Image (cartoon, rainbow, N blue to C red):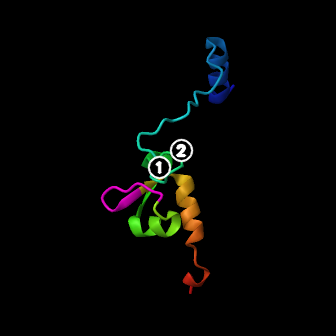
Amino acid sequence: MGFKARDRARRKESGDDKASTKAKEGIEACGVNGCEGWSDASMGGRSISVNDAEDMWGKGYTARKNRVRICKSCYRSWKKSNKQDDHHY
């Protein structure tokens, strides 16, 4: 019996059979209005410039110190819209 099997057996005996996967609660909300995501770095959040945010979302964002903190999904949509195929030489 390997260490993983022993650990599984120990968890079943103690009643802690489920993995402890609680949803993380963020600290800093996404700066895009209408988005419910979290912009914490530990959750994949990023920071983009006010000019880039204005090009993407117009005036629908909240800025701090000329930067807009956005969640991972908003960052991915911004990145996808700004992708340029002629950038690679």
Measure how far apart labels 2 and 1 are at the Cα level: 7 Å
Q: Residue furthest bottom?
A: 89
Give the percent coordinates (x, y) of residue 80.
59, 67
Which residue is disc 1 drawn over?
Answer: 30
Q: Quadrant of the C terminus?
A: bottom right
72 left or right of 85 in image:
left
Q: Residues within 10 Å of mark 1 (few under 14, many from 20)?
A: many
**Viewer-proximal residue, 29 or 21?**
29
**Viewer-proximal residue, 75 or 50?**
50
Question: Of helix, strand and loop, which mostly describes the magenta segment?
Answer: loop
Mark sitting on residue 55: none
As displayed, is residue 26 above or below residue 17?
below
Report the residue at 52% width, 59% height from top.
75
Report the residue at 62% width, 23% height from top.
7
Q: Residues within 10 Å of mark 2 (few under 14, many from 20)?
A: few
Q: Amino acid at mark 2?
A: Glu
Give the percent coordinates (x, y) of residue 8.
66, 23
Q: For the residues labelled 2 and 1, say whether their Cβ atoms are less than 8 Å apart.
A: yes
On the image, which quarter does residue 3 sit in?
top right
Report the residue at 30% width, 58% height from top.
65
Q: Which residues are magenta?
A: 60-68
On the image, which quarter does residue 52 sit in?
bottom left
SS at badge 1: loop
Q: Give yes or no for residue 52 being in the magenta stretch.
A: no
Q: Amino acid at mark 1?
A: Cys
Which residue is disc 2 drawn over?
Answer: 36
Q: Residue furthest left?
A: 65
**Viewer-proximal residue, 51 or 40?**
51
Give the percent coordinates (x, y) of residue 43.
49, 46
